[in-house]
Image (tube, helix red, strand yellow):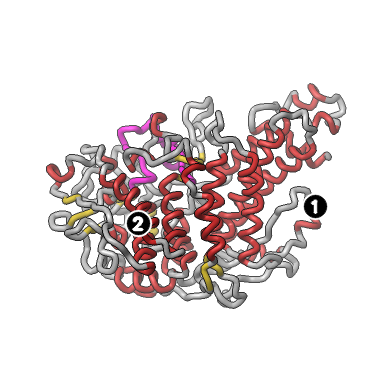
Amino acid sequence: MKKIFNIIYAMLVICGLASCDSFLDEHTPQGTLSDDQVKAAENAEAMAVSAYAIFTTAEDINSSFSMWNFDVRSDDAYKGGSGTSDGDVFHQLEVQQGVLTTNWNINDMWVRLYNSLSRVNSAISLLNSCDDSFSMKQQRLAEMKFLRAYGHFLLKRLYKNIPFVENENLTYEEYNTLSNRTYSNDEGWQLIIDDLMEAYNTLPQAQVEKGRPTKAAAAAFLAKVYLYKAYHQDEASSNQVTSINQQDLEKVIEFTNPSLYTNYGLESDFHNNFRPEEQYENGIESLWAIQYSRNDGSTYGNLNWSYGLIPPNIPGATDGGCDFYKPSQNLVNAYRTGADGLPLLDTFNAKDYDKASDNADPRLFLTVGMPGLPYMFNKNFMMEETSIWSRSNGLYGYHVSLKQNVDPALIDSYLIKGSYWASSMNRIVFRYADVLLMRAEAYAQLGQSAEAITLVNQIRSRAASSTQMISNYPSLYGVKMYIANYKGSYTKEQTVKIVKMERRLEMGMECERFFDLVRWGDAATVLNKYYAEEIDNCAIYGNAHFTANKDEYLPIPFEQISASNGHYTQNIGNW
């Protein structure tokens, strides 16, 4: 009980519910809380708040829970920065060469996420000890199960073979005997599903405090985990997809049923999902978002520092911007459309996008900032092929991500300079467009092509109308925007290809791409082709190579292997 009290006290101080000078004296002269005091509802609430808080406070610019740092392994983005030695361990991941189990970033993310799970489990333990007079007990437990699933989900996508901390009352000795191979890959996904089902069965349809998950958020999360689980990768000596499970796909269909999302839908404009102003946050498309804020009484507020390396270095505006996570030319080319307004599924990368001659999906101009166009739609900051827009002087190109960045006109209101840049813009974890795409993917893999294409067309119709920020681009800058819906009938193979491309276009630069490629079993094929084709645009790929059955997942950190007393087994690939 003393250990629990220490944790509670620390969390109360963090949450502003206790002061270091007075808390002990106020409650007990001896400095020891009784069991009843520890189990008090207000303490349980404080612990639940602290469990939420760690998903913002435990991340930083080098270890963002958005995973942008690790999405540089995909064909969507270059690492960026001033050169290959700037964030060299992420350069090694980008080209899949020289990655060591001792690299600090490999261990850092592991530690941060398990620290998050530790705090969630402490909250669950305390909530379980409260009696039923605490009216919010079951709902708070459901929220914590959702957060525990989230922590395990992020870890599993990164490392595959992880120890699961499902027992919230583990002793220190018991924790040190956990194995990262107790469960098969399929069983690991099921453990996450089990937590989510508990959450789903209890969470309300709506929450007054927007950062708390709802039943719809749990449904979307369940659909995502079932979709990962469907692509079976259970061979001990392989990361290959050996089968696609129909029952799991049917679960995706079940948990993406529109009847579960009566309070949600697509924003009228795609860009509304990536605006910091309060009127756009927690909108109709946002199922669950990490909540950031400003003006909350502290020096910087609860700002998102994890995107601090991404802003470009604009003199007089974002001075000190580090220019990381830069959209690739390959991604830009993917937004090219043909004379029929459809993606060039097989030939999009045959030539580089030319705004003077190529038709483009409007989402290109809402995802990627390009030379000749205004940065963040602000005409005072026209992008050019200069060092302002590329700290590497063109090594990583001149494109800039728009989804994580904020208009420099909003500096000191929604964009704040501290040690690095930060903003108060929420990060949407699950949005309704993703629900539609997951449903479309499940239908496609089940051979129900017509249903899948209908859903894809919903996404494309919204994209076509997403022009509030860019309606004058054709007249002012000469771009050609043309997007149309799919018509006719398609085979299963064609439909799967269509859905995969639509997912890339809709979710580009949202840190999903690498994990999608691994989930589909496409990583080696797609990325080695990308390296070969991208050398002319980004010379760093000259020695890049993706090794199947190794590079799909990060290695288990050396520090964790060493501390496990033989209970952890390294991932395959001869690290």
Question: What's the residue type where badge 1 is placed?
Answer: Thr
Which image quarter holds the N terminus?
top right
Q: Is residue 127 left or right of residue 270?
A: right
At 36% across and 65% down in the image, what residue appears? 497
In magenta, the rendered stretch is 402-430
- Give whichever of 480, 305 is nearer the camera: 480
> Looking at the picture, how far across and down is residue 142, in whole percent?
66, 41
At 13% across and 55% down in the image, what residue appears? 356
Q: To which residue does mark 1 refer?
A: 171
At 36% across and 46% down in the image, what residue appears? 403
> Looking at the picture, how far across and down is residue 337, in whole percent?
22, 58
At 53% across and 52% down in the image, what residue appears? 254
Q: Is residue 294 magenta?
A: no
Give the CA separation, mark 2 to mark 1: 51 Å
Question: What's the residue type where badge 2 is placed?
Answer: Ile
The quarter of the displayed image where residue 202 is located: top right
> Looking at the picture, how far across and down is residue 323, in whole percent?
36, 51
- Camera-nearest label, 2 or 1: 2
Q: To which residue does mark 2 refer?
A: 453
